Image: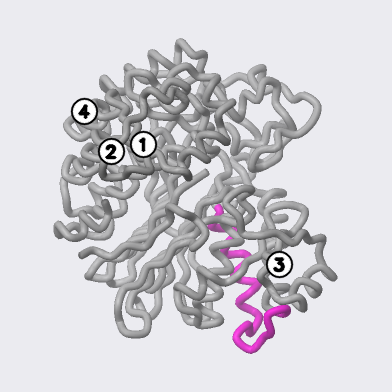
Amino acid sequence: MGCEILARGGNAMDAAIAAAFALSVVEPWLSGLGGGGFLLFANSDGEVATLDFGVRAAAGIQSCDYILVEGNDGDWFNWPRVKNNNNLIGPKSICVPGTVHGLSAALQRYGSLRWDEVIAPTIELAARGMRIDWFAELAIANDRDGLSKNAEAASAFLNQSRRKTSPEFPNSYFLRLPQNVTFLERLAKEGADDFYEGEIAHKMLKSLCQYGSRLTKNDLRNYQSEWRAPLSLQYKGREVYAMSQLSGGPTLLAALASLGRVDLSAASEPEITLAYANALMAADRLRLETMGHAAGKDSCTSHVSVVDRKGNMVALTNTLLSRFGSKVMVPDLEILLNNGMMWFDPRRDRPNSIAPGEKPLANMSPVIAVRGKKPEIALGAAGGRKIVPAVAQILSYLVDLNYSPEEAMHAPRIDTSSDTLLINRAFSAETLQSVAQHHKTRIVEDTLLPVNFAVPSLVTSGCGNGKNIGAAHPNSPWAAAIAES
């Protein structure tokens, strides 16, 4: 969809927003209009702006909804377990969605096409239906238990009779959600405000009230995405821009600052990998100990990177958090809603503890690197806490080691998002041994399941022969780099 928009004369922002809308239909287990995210935009002169459209807790949440019980939840963050998993699944896990507001605000400021023009290709997709191939079946099967707890989600994704075949794709089925088509048509016609104050908001709140959610009319009406200045860091001849505040940006730049003091271009593979491990683990410890809404404001996901013919760049990360978010689908809209409460620490008196009306500490970390006042790299990833390690390493591969985008995507990585460092078996035996001497490690494959490493994508401008280049994670069957025809 993004390439189609570029071919029609749209710019990078138009294309990124069109792609985000399309992903809500074709890949609803990763991101959707009931979620939230971050966006960076750089114009061809290298001026950068960031937009925070992250989710926010309802003002009326109550501590009795999130009582700690014995054990850990085993999800992305392995928090202490909450009774009934209320912070992970179901109506109590839902935060105020920010995606629709954010996409609208971004298009108004930097887009060149109308709102309805950008949404139109997604309406066509929705009318055709979500394509269900083996990979989509795998995603659905992995969350069958959670989806079965919500009648509408179960009907949509688990009812085989709703799937139809197509001569065009004999090995796939298509799942058409007619209420979702109607929802998208109304959103295109009435604008984003309808999602927060109009008929769409009314339908959403009616269902959520019946389910037992704490979201109210005021929560939706008062939601605002936020434009703010980016964080930036000089790194090896580039200015690297990232999100500020409650994102992965501060952690990413802290790791890059450490790496910036090392000449990695002259180092061996074991030395480089150990430098990554040391820098990322130190930055992550600082993040978890000090960052969150209570620490001061400065303290399953999809990513889209776009560059247009003029050199404008967008790095956009959007998420429902867990696969299929809260597993709650609004019947009259047929959209899934996030489980944003998962991002909060359920323990009390922590920097990122659950609190009414607050934004949780997110992991998304889209970046744009500028060189000589020209945007050079737009990069981001999907994968929860695994995002920052992936983005830092790939950026270093491009800048420090002068890898091509393809080489950077195929290079093995480590992941430092847990107490045990994960290291790709593809590294040399010497590197595996060197890292294991300094850190508790586990050797793993870069597999679809379990997800051991984040799923990145990037675009570069003017590399080598002067052409724009895109690259995506080679092991993800649905990740792709596409050029306008």
Judge from the rendering whether residue 107 lies leftward or rightward of residue 315; answer left or right: left
Task: Kindly identify which residue carries mark 2.
Answer: 166
Give the x, y percent position of residue 145: 59, 26
Q: Are the two marked residues, 2 and 4, in contact with CB atoms closer than 8 angstroms?
A: no
Closer-to-camera residue (52/324): 324
Residue 277's disc number: 3
Comparing labels 1 and 4, the label whose residue is closer to the camera: 1
Q: Is residue 258 magenta?
A: yes
The residues bearing labels 3 and 2 have C-alpha atoms spaced at a distance of 48 Å
Q: Amino acid at mark 1?
A: Tyr
Give the x, y percent position of residue 29: 47, 38
Q: Is residue 296 magenta?
A: no
Q: Earlier in the sequence, mark 1 or mark 3?
A: 1
Task: Kindly identify which residue carries mark 4.
Answer: 186
Q: Amino acid at mark 4?
A: Arg
Q: Earlier in the sequence, mark 1 or mark 4?
A: 1
Q: Secondary structure at mark 4?
A: helix
The C terminus, quarter of image = bottom left
**What span is colored magenta in the figure?**
248-271
Q: Earlier in the sequence, mark 4 or mark 3?
A: 4
Q: Earlier in the sequence, mark 3 or mark 2?
A: 2
The residues bearing labels 1 and 3 have C-alpha atoms spaced at a distance of 43 Å
At x 27% / y 25%, what residue is drawn? Answer: 178
Q: Secondary structure at mark 1?
A: strand
